[in-house]
Amino acid sequence: MFKNKDITIGSLFVALGIVYGDIGTSPLYVMQAILYTNNSIATRELVLGGVSLVFWTLTLQTTIKYVVLTLQADNNGEGGILALYALVKRYFKWLIVPAIIGVAAILADGILTPPISVSSAIEGLNLIVFLKEDITVMIVLIIILLLFSAQKFGTEKIGKIFGPIMFVWFSMIGFFGIVQLVQNPRILEGLNPYYAFKLLANGNVPYILGAVFLCTTGAEALYSDLGHCGRINIYYSWIFVKITLLLSYFGQGAYLLSREGHSFVNSPFFLIMPKWFIIPGVIIATLAAIIASQALISGSFTLISEAIKLNIFPKLAIRYPTKEKGQVYIGTVNKALCIGCVGIILIFKQSQNMQAAYGLSITITMLMTTLLLSQYIRFVKNQKKLWIVVLLVFGTIELSFLYANSFKILSGGYVTLLITAALAFVMYVWQYSFEIKKRYLKFVSLTDYKENFNILKNDSELPLYAGNVVYLTKSKLWNQVEPKVIYSIFNNDPKKADNYWFININVTDDPYTREYIFNKIEENRIFVIDFNLGFRVSQGINTMMFQVIRDLIKSGEVVFKPRNYMIDYENLKGIGNFKFIIIEEVLALENDFSTWDSFIISTQLFIKKFTVSPQKWYGIDTSVVDVEKVPILFSRGLPDETLKRIK
């Protein structure tokens, strides 16, 4: 949307609306979570140590790691864990592991963010009127259900007001923070890291770190939304966001410090507001929470879309609800996220209970990003010492937070682990099954079958199957195809045609590549098209193919003999009808796969039943598609035993 050099008031508002929803709503519950580690009783040591830990976590994790370092790892202007993986995947095969785990953890976070942020906002009403737990749950459920119901329409129009709303939100939390700071400036002692170390030395370290880490949830979005907002816009807007966040945290700390020894049931975020402002404050907080949730939902759609095109996630139907670049809608993901959010709300009911599950997924994601970032610095930037520093410093910090969050597993963190593990397993099966097939995949040269094509053409007993027959192949060499394609043409219902097209799609590491290479096996008869498409480009082959054919006719590289009865349609006269052949695989009962490989292939084929069909994925009219099934059969040869004829 914005190049790195573009910076305007409008672009800064866009960054506020897109990037900072998640991290911006963290003041709703962070200080409450810190208090909860001490039975909700405010002590000087806890408050000063807590705000000190928050300050240094935001500085080290968010500012230095993400804003200063990670934003530099852009993939042609795009960011996110898969964009980073695309930059480094050629160096080590094992890097697919942190990429898969990171994606799974981000998706798990997409299920947890809406419930905790919206619940935290609505619970502010308890300061003026006591809401029964069931009433709060019902209000949160209604908001969540309405939010997910609106996804299929896109957010192009309402998205324009996200920036101004978030500006109001950050201005509000900064203002009330300043008010408390003026009344009790002693809280500024928390800038000294001594208080952070002192609290960790004397306090319940795992639970304190687990609570503090919540202040940096959403930092991953700074990198993921790089392509939408541009690096320079994130730089400048982060200055404003960080100042207001710190004012809110220190303001809440100032309020608690002046009431040392008191026990707090409600979040100090709303306690620092005057009572007459509670309702407006709750409304603004709820809007900010909805925007934060929207950012996670939209980010999940984009992430899944990228993962599909990088072949690490099953193919799902993708829609483009608006003309806005990069905005996608995946109905299956929307339903899954909605069901997950509803389940979290019904299970945990209160935001305080959700904090146990929240944070663990982001810790895992950050650790995976650190692994990939260190390899980017090592190989792409060629900085031999810095990558070790990055890995050790941020790896140590994140492992400490992961250790702290591991104590939350039994009290709710297991939800995060189950969701992350399930998603990671699906991606592992999908990716590894592809590697298994590739291991045994063989190719044959099309040039060796020229004579067979001529015999088929001249066979007067065979009717014309179609004017043009199209096959999708996976060969890396332009003149080769899989044996099953040759079998389909000549043996399995021989396909006599005027022209044969063999199409290969290569997904590039560049996010927005749109290129093709054209080759001919035989003049005006057998053609090969290799598409090079970025991992953020739609793979609608039907449309792209006709564009290519139009280009080839115009350049004279392809000449078709028009039939007299054909009508000139957009300069494609004489080309005839098209028939796409989709070859689906089934696992043969007899094969020599290992037990594990056979299990993976079987699982992959089972998962495939719930995915979108190839014809829908490639945007092909189902009336021009024939589907053929072939067995996946790997055998080392015939068995030693042979049959003996007795009669």
Image: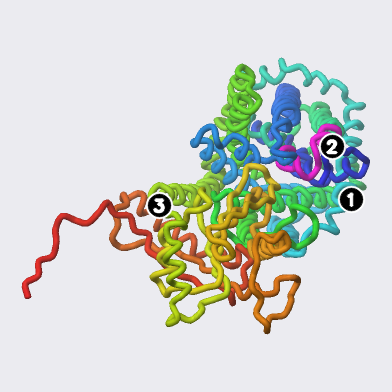
Q: Earlier in the sequence, mark 1 or mark 2?
A: 2
Q: Which residues are magenta?
A: 222-236
Residue 72 in the image: x percent, y percent?
73, 30
Residue 491 in the image: x percent, y percent?
38, 70
Q: Answer whether residue 624 is magenta in the image.
A: no
Residue 247 in the image: x percent, y percent?
85, 31
Specify the quadrant of the image occupied by residue 329.
Answer: bottom right
Task: Give residue 233's mark.
Answer: 2
Residue at 72% x, 39% y is: 76
Number of residues whose C-alpha sits closer than 10 Å to that of mark 1, classed few (under 14), some (14–19) or many (20 or more): few
Q: Of 587 and 606, which appears nearest the observer? A: 587
Give me the C-alpha separation between circle 1 and circle 3.
66 Å
Specify the quadrant of the image occupied by residue 333.
Answer: bottom right
Residue at 59% x, 44% y is: 103
Task: Say above or below: 395 vs 162.
Answer: above
Number of residues whose C-alpha sits closer than 10 Å to that of mark 2, classed few (under 14), some (14–19) or many (20 or more): many
Left or right: 77 as drawn, with respect to 394: right
Mark 1 highlights which residue?
280
Q: Amino acid at mark 1?
A: Pro
Q: Quadrant of the C terminus?
A: bottom left
Give me the C-alpha separation between circle 2 and circle 3.
49 Å
Number of residues whose C-alpha sits closer than 10 Å to that of mark 3, classed few (under 14), some (14–19) or many (20 or more): few
Left or right: 229 as drawn, with respect to 628: right
Q: Amino acid at mark 2?
A: Asn
Q: Answer whether residue 231 is magenta in the image.
A: yes
Mark 3 highlights which residue?
442
